[in-house]
Image: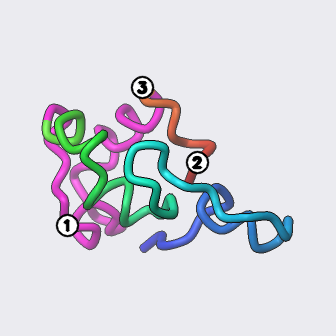
Amino acid sequence: MIKRGLGTHGYLMAQRPQTLCTLCNTPITIKHLFSSCPLYSIPLNRFNLPPNLSQLLSDSSPHLTNLFLFLRLHNLLPQI
């Protein structure tokens, strides 16, 4: 399961401050984007994506196609 990405942890390698969510003012993490950010809760439901990261990101997840559609539509791929 993917838990870290360049967008969510790249600041460590670049030695810069962590990116914060503009709505929540909390660090942008994969868990934040898919489980707790109110900005994406309705769009996640529209794509029928579960809030459970284990279900969403497992290798055998039936949600992977919708996940990538969601990420592209909301321009989130560079952030994770």
Q: Quick check: is 4 in the magenta stretch?
A: no
State the image coordinates of residue 53 (x, y, percent, origin top left).
28, 67
Q: How many marks?
A: 3
Q: Is residue 54 magenta?
A: yes
Secondary-structure class at tag 2? helix
**13 on left or right of 73:** right
Amino acid tagged 1: Asn
Crowd band around label 3 with a 10 angstrom C-alpha radius: few (<14), some (14–19), many (20+): few
The image quarter in which residue 8 lies:
bottom right
The residue under the point 22% across, 52% down is: 62
Task: Tell me: residue 33, above or below residue 58.
Answer: above
Q: Secondary structure at mark 1?
A: loop
**Residue at 56% from the left image edge and 70% from the top image edge:** 4
Name the N-terminal-most of marks 2 and 1: 1
- Range drawn in magenta: 46-72
Report if the CB atoms under discs 2 and 3 are less than 8 Å apart: no
* Quadrant where the image shows the N terminus: bottom left
Is label 3 in a helix, a strand or a loop?
helix
Separation of residues labelled 2 and 1 (CA atoms): 19 Å
Compute the Cα span from label 2 to label 3.
13 Å
What amino acid is labelled 2 in the image? Gln
Residue 47: quarter of image: top left
- Relative to 6, 75 lies left or right: left
> Within 10 Å of the Cα at label 1, are there few (<14), some (14-19), or many (20+) other Cα atoms?
few
For discs 2 and 1, the disc positioned in front in the rendered view = 2
For label 1, the residue is: 52
- Which circle marks residue 73 in the picture? 3
